Amino acid sequence: MSSGEKYVAAAYGVFVVVVLVWVAILAAKLSRLERETGELAQLARARPATGDHADG
Amino acid sequence: MSIAKPSLTALASVAAALVTLSAVLIFVVAPEDADQGFSQKIFYVHVPIALTAYACFGLGAWKAYRVLATRGERYDLESYTGVHLGTIFGVLTLVTGAIWAKASWGVWWTWSSNQLVLFLVLFLFYCAYFMLRFSIEPGPRRERISAVYALFGVALIPVSFFAIRLANDFIHPTVFTREGPQMTGEMFFAFCVSWASITLLAYVMYRVELAGKRIDANLRELREALQT
């Protein structure tokens, strides 16, 4: 591999790596949001029923 | 009449196809530069990334203007996302530029090029945006101050963009002159496709980031409502 080719590979490699890091960060955020949504759903289910259904 | 936004899946698919096509055009179709040889291929990724960084900062500033003009909360998040992506593409511009500089000039960086220094100033200006934003409590005050700051930064974009023409910068090359692009038709076509693919990729990233930030904000609100 010539030095020119190495520099080109490095420039394109950096671009690909940054996009992949961005995807990895987003994946981590997505799993956090999934966990938080699950917690909120549990919290909502645990709350006592209110409104029309309460007086049966 | 409102125009429906194209779906994120369709946009991401088109972006992926364009990125693949641009890779083929750059490495198979576009001829090698007679002067710089193979290392000139960095041009096809470095320049579109730099133009995308300018576009993202510009978008952030436009949304900041909308925050100030309409007091719309949603524009604050959009402005922040634009600046955030501009910073990511700014890092990429500086890194790919340094690699190209090393390949062409033999140095990673030179302080004598106005184009380079002004881009660094623009980048650092927008890096400070995050320090300012996160030093203020969330709310209308933070939205206004962040918007004013993002709007100020937009003045640096044309200065940075036209620096090589304004200051007769002999180090940084000027490819687009009044006579048109200084390259062959195949090279110019490869450049245009690469530019379109990176711009579209940035737009997809913008939409995904924005959706994530909106979900985050909605969940925080929902948690507060459920816990009271």
Image: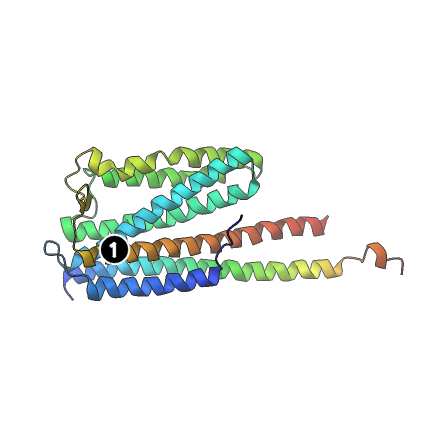
Secondary structure category for the residue under label 1: helix
Q: Position of residue B202 (x, y in %)?
A: 39, 53
Q: Residue furthest left?
A: B34
Residue B123 appears left or right of B25? right
What's the amino acid at mark 1? Answer: Phe
Q: Disc 1 designates what residue? A: B191
Q: Position of residue B62 (x, y in %)?
A: 44, 39
Q: Is residue B149 in view?
A: yes
Q: Is residue B106 in view?
A: no
Residue B219 appears left or right of B106? right
* Rendering colour mode: rainbow
Which residue is at a point 52% across and 33% down the rendered structure image?
B69
- For label 1, the crowd category at 10 Å Cα-Cα, with few meaning under 14, some 14 to 19 and many 20 or more, is many
> Residue B168 versus residue B1: which sits nearer the camera?
B1
How many numbered circles does the render carry? 1
> Residue B211 versus residue A26: which sits nearer the camera?
B211
Which residue is at a point 36% across and 57% down the rendered structure image?
A18
Q: Position of residue A34 (x, y in %)?
A: 58, 62
> Residue B135 versus residue B9: which sits nearer the camera?
B9
Q: Position of residue B161 (x, y in %)?
A: 28, 39
In the picture, residue A48 is in which quadrant? bottom right
> Residue B222 versus residue B69: which sits nearer the camera?
B69
Chain ID for label 1?
B
Q: Residue furthest front?
A: B1
Residue B65, relative to residue B223: is it above or below?
A: above
Which residue is at a point 21% across and 38% down the rendered structure image?
B164
Residue B98, relative to residue B148: is it above or below?
A: below
